[in-house]
Image (spheres, rainbow, N blue to C red):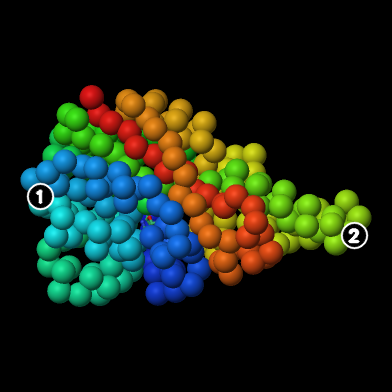
Amino acid sequence: MRELQDQGRQWSRHAARYDDLFLDAFQPGVVNPVLGMLDAVPEPGRKTVADLGCGVGPLLPHLVGRFGRVIALDFAPGMIAHAQARLGPDAERVTFETRPMHDLEHLAGQLDVAVAINSIVMPDVRVIDRTLRAIRASLAPGGVFLGVVPSVDAIQYHTMLLLDQALDRGLTPEEAERSAAFHAEHHYYDFAFGRFAFRGLRQKFWQSFELEHRLTKAGFSAVELDRVLYPWDENLACGADLAQYPQSWDWAFRARVS
Ligand SMILES: C[S@@+](CC[C@H](N)C(=O)[O-])C[C@H]1O[C@@H](n2cnc3c(N)ncnc32)[C@H](O)[C@@H]1O
């Protein structure tokens, strides 16, 4: 719990500069299949949706006015405050909750759709498993869980492209590896366990097999994976030089409660 409270404080601290520091899965130029998954929900006006780990709220404009009831939850008060300010008068149409995502008993069986965009990132996998079970229990039978998790294999893909580029420039293998590791910021990552530590934040990064495994273990069925595709732009190291290659990604998913 102490670790979770610390992370809540850290996320709050980063709320003001969130957009400068993190990729936004909804910014123009990003291909995000979650938007299509939301469009495919029948009769949204009669349904309840929850944005779990809403952050500064980039998903909320896609939910307000479309779904009958919108809940936005985050354990970081700073994030909730920014999400409310960004939404303006529409904030009144959203129920905001400041609480950790494993604490959903009050919503048991009430949600039709739960969405988690890059927010299932707790560094302790026991907390992740507990959170996924809580999300499943918050969904009504037939409910869907949609989301995005940060991909650790995309960092390795980016590293491969940077390594080739450095070798093509004539660097030795050792120099090329050092250059690729520098530009891909390997010092923030633990690749074996899929972790990322940055300015006090500690986040889980995912492989697709772990996502399937943990969703199934939590009792979800019909797990489908897809990719959020990011343009090679200034948000990714040396992005402009990599434009001819397939895009980098995060993992998107849809899972059901039967
Ligand atoms: C990387 S940000 C993503 C925010 C937002 N969903 C977006 O797409 O921009 C992760 C968010 O999840 C929240 N978060 C992380 N772990 C959480 C937990 N256990 N309970 C509630 N919120 C959590 C953080 O406070 C942060 O706002």
Residue under numbered circle 2: 170
Residue 246: horizontal and vertical position, in percent? 60, 50
Residue drawn at x 68%, y 55% is 186
Residue drawn at x 14%, y 47% is 44
- The label on residue 147 is none
Residue 207 position by quadrant: top right
The secondary element bearing badge 1 is classed as: helix
The reply to whether residue 185 is in sight is no
Compared across the picture, whether 237 is left or right of 28 comes to: right
The secondary element bearing badge 2 is classed as: loop
Residue 46 position by quadrant: top left
Compared across the picture, whether 73 is left or right of 210 comes to: left
The three-letter code of the residue at mark 1 reads Gly
Number of marks present in the image shown? 2
Residue 90: horizontal and vertical position, in percent? 16, 69
Q: Nearer the viewer, residue 4 or 61?
A: 61
Residue under numbered circle 1: 45
Farthest front residue in view: 244
Residue 222: horizontal and vertical position, in percent? 34, 26
Residue drawn at x 26%, y 47% is 38
Q: Nearer the viewer, residue 12 or 84?
A: 84
The reply to whether residue 221 is in sight is yes
* C-alpha distance separating marks 1 and 2: 59 Å
Residue drawn at x 52%, y 49% is 249
State which image quarter holds ligand 1: bottom left
Q: Earlier in the sequence, mark 1 or mark 2?
A: 1
Q: Residues within 10 Å of mark 1 (few under 14, many from 20)?
A: few
Q: Residues within 10 Å of mark 2 (few under 14, many from 20)?
A: few
Up the image or down, 257 lies above or below 78; here it is: above
Looking at the rendered image, the quarter that the C terminus falls into is: top left
Compared across the picture, whether 49 is left or right of 116 comes to: left
